[in-house]
Amino acid sequence: MVFEKLLLLLLLILATSLVLVVWRLMRGPSVADRALAFELILLHIAGMVALYAVVAGVRAMIDVVLIVVVAGFVSMVAVARYMEEGRY
Amino acid sequence: MSVVEVVTVVLAGVGGGGLVLAAVGVLRLPDVYSRMHAVGKAGTTGASIILLSVAVYERDLVVGVKVLVIIGVCFLTMPVVVHMLCRAAYLVGVAPDNSTWRDELAGAYDRKARRLRSLWEEDRQGARHPAVCDNGDGRVAPDADGMGD
């Protein structure tokens, strides 16, 4: 019981820090700032989904984390290449 | 709470603390090149430790292998991503913060060919001369032997 409460508290803390990152995502002066903030958002999602897998007892959620990490890598490489080629 | 649950909560707390630190760093650090450190180090480590806590809680071979694979992918890809983003930012001319006191890449990038070159070339006697480098803003570093490249 205490265990679930603590993990839910941790999820709440992570959601709060997610708000900080979203603030940077909206403010970020350059595209690279926003891309970095989005990468950190993906890491937050990975951690929160992993915690949710423990809280809800759904082991299949671990696969979701793998997909999020790999998709984040591919998309961020694409963003970096577009920045270099497109000069914006 | 059993021992396993205590270890899980402690590991998840440490990982969550790392993610919160990364978020504060991304919010507070002055420019892209320093925010890179927050995402690349604190963020990766935090998420990996949270995943480790899940593996400790489940005590299952399949879940453990999956978690190890995810951590390996994280540690392989995150430095690449962060470095590519900051290289792109430098190439499109995102200015570093005023507190930056040395830019060792200044003039070393051939922006047309997108190649990083040494500012110095060695001749056969081992003496060092400044290398030719078109840095894209009209300034060309002095030619070493007067014969171009």
Image (spheres, coloured by chain):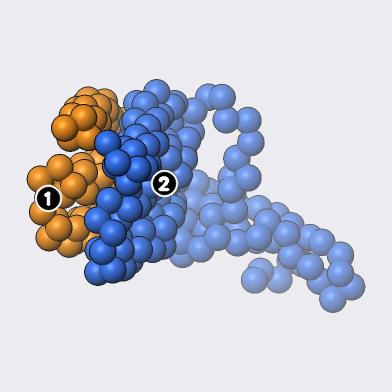
Chain colours: A orange, B blue
Residue B70: horizontal and vertical position, in percent?
31, 61
Residue farthest right in this picture:
B125
Q: What residue type is labelled 1?
A: Gly
Disc 2, SS: helix
Q: Mark 2 points at which residue?
A: B45
Instruction: Kindly identify the residue that appears in the image at 81 percent across and 71 percent down.
Output: B123
Give percent across and percent down for residue A62: 19, 58
* The C terminus of chain B - image quarter: bottom right
In the drawing, does residue B124 fall left or right of residue B66? right
- Using the rendered image of the protein, determine whether residue A31 is visible from the camera's viewpoint: no
Work out how far the residue at label 1 is from the one at label 2, CA to CA, in angstroms.
24 Å
In which quarter of the view is residue A19 placed? Answer: top left
- Local crowd at mark 2 within 10 Å, few (<14), some, or many (≥20)? many
Numbered badge on residue A84: none
Residue type highlighted by circle 2: Thr
Residue matched to label 1? A57
In the picture, the quarter occupied by the N terminus of chain B is top left
Label 1 resides on the chain identified as: A
Frontmost residue, A18 versus B58: B58
* Quarter of the rendering containing residue A18: top left
Measured as percent of width and height from the top left, residue A53 is found at: 16, 49
